[in-house]
Amino acid sequence: MESQQEEGLTINTLMKEVQGTLDKFKLEDDNGMADYYSPYANLEKAQVLHEARCFHDPTAVRESPRKCCTVIAQLLHLTNTGQYLNSAEATEVFFGVTKLFMSDDASLRRMVYLFIKDVAETCNPDDVIIVTSSLTKDMTCDVDLYRANALRVLARIVDAAMLGAIERYVKQAVVDSSGQVSSAALVSATHLFEKNAESAAIVKRWIGETTEATQSPNEMVQFHAMQLLYQIKKHDRLGMQKLVTQFSQRNTLKSPLALVLLVRYTAKLLHDEVSEGRLPGTSFQNGSNFSRAGYAFLEASLRHKSEMVVYEAAKAICALPNIEPQELAPAVNVMQLFLSSPKPAVRFAAMKTVSQVAVNHPRMVSKCNEDLEALIADANRSIATLAITTLLKTGSENSVDRLLKQISVFLSEIPDEYKITIVKSLQRLCLTYPAKHRVLVGFLSNFLREEGGFEFKRSIVNSIVSLIKAVPETTESSLLHLCEFIEDCEFTMLSTQILHLLGELGPATAAPARYIRFIYNRVILENSAVRAAAVAALSK
């Protein structure tokens, strides 16, 4: 994988080099503050095009490859910052770059490949075709770096007719002993498959070589081979079932990334089994042969040595539709172990999945409550917020008071975006346990009087209004809390919304007169919009 990142021809690679150069040019100003100067700042296209003429000088190419690399980087910077070359300029520069194939400098050759890939779509197609002979020559040379990069570039510029001419070389590269070359060929084949129907038809003929590539000892080759096999067979349900069954039973894939793909393909086929009505009952273990084999593979993957494979399998099982609790239990047990992982990314992933499971299977998740309560104090606020919202879904009526006590401390320390998520969870909890409406509405109203932005306050008001409609017993106490809020409300929209609500619901309460004082104060003290809403409410 590291070799792929080192040799891959991407703009990200160039940007990293630019950033590295930028760091070298760091200067200290008079105040001692760091001031960065970019060598690519204030570039003039005319000057860069003039310097690009050095590509036509064999001596300069041979003796100053670093200068040529710098000019190509400047050209790429221009095109990627909106200073595009016109057709004549692009053609002239393109022909100059093709002469750099005579250089044996590895860095310069990599920049040449990158430049051709970047400008291939803007140049005249007839001009681009000219470079294919040099690329084909590189594709059959002895240097793995040149072979891999030439394959990537060719995938961008060849059409179906030209692909037929170089098909033999690409097929050989797919099963090459070099992982770098094999991965480049497989990735190029994936791009060609998506390019057009004619190229896809040619790539489909490489299924034998692609299947052979899955036996490679290189993990990235296995990963890319699985990707290509899926592209070829994804519209063939029986072919995909055969592919998944074959690899899940043979246990030949050693790459964790390839196994993650296999888990995802298995999960997708199991979803299709349910959506298309081929699962007679609700249990996958009592379904069709493929349903049983697919679920068995996902469950077996929970015991894999790689964390990413274990998590992906557990996530897939948790997301299966209409799954029985006993089938879900192994995945929940794995997620419970991940909740105490020392890695924040693993804890967050597990927490997010557990939160989703709690929507449909709160009892299954309730056994994780002790671990979830420990995560409320997690340094990562996203994890802590998810822990609280999940506890609100799985907690019992008796635990509501204890949870609110823990949340009250936590809410004062987090941004509004997290507070809004918790407010929505509290609203759902009140609908689940209507008997706790006084406690929950009182808790929400307390935070109306605390510091917070408009969106946070609006979410609380909307939640209280929704609870009034869903649980009529909350009406009078909720209206009083809202009246106290508008006494010191800085948001006109919320004040008018609450006044309108008082006008609608106040007359139907047992003692409407208690709200008149709050409404009358708004007539005297507020701006015109709030005064108008208050007068309209009094008239009712």
Image (tube, rainbow, N blue to C red):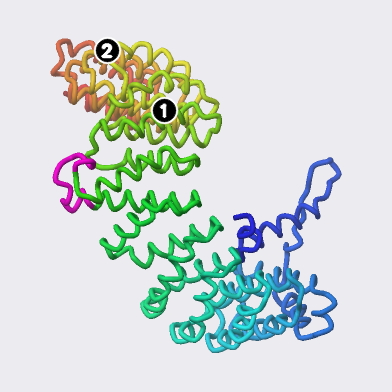
Task: Using a 10 Å C-alpha cutoff, classify the residue at mark 1 as few (fewer than 14 neighbours), some (14 to 19) or many (20 or more).
Answer: many
Pick whichever, 172 or 103, lies toward us: 172
Mark number displayed over residue 438: 2
Residue drawn at x 37%, y 50% is 264
Q: CA distance from mark 2 to mark 1?
A: 33 Å
**Residue 121 visible at all:** no
Q: Is residue 313 above or below residue 162?
A: above
The residue at the point 49 percent across, 59 percent down is 222
Q: Which residues are magenta?
A: 273-286
Asked if the stretch drawn in magenta spans residue 283, the answer is yes
Q: 212 left or right of 281?
A: right
Which residue occupies the foreground of this view, 409 or 505?
A: 409
Residue 410 against residue 185 in the figure, above or below? above
State the SS at label 1.
helix
Type of residue at label 2?
Arg
Task: Describe the element under mark 2 as helix, strand or loop.
Answer: helix
**Horizontal and vertical percent for residue 60?**
83, 80
Q: Which mark is residue 514?
A: none
Residue 533 appears at what percent x and percent y? Answer: 27, 29
Q: Amino acid at mark 1?
A: Gln
- Residue depicted at 30% across the width and 12% down the height: 439
- Image quarter where the N terminus lies is bottom right
At 44% from the left and 50% from the top, the residue drawn is 259
Look at mark 1 in the image and give the residue it sits on: 336
Query: Which of the 4 image quarters holds residue 196?
Result: bottom left
Label whose residue precedes the other's in the sequence (2 or 1): 1
Q: Find out whether the residues at labels 2 and 1 contact each other: C-beta distance under 8 Å.
A: no
Rendered position, 120 above or below 127: above
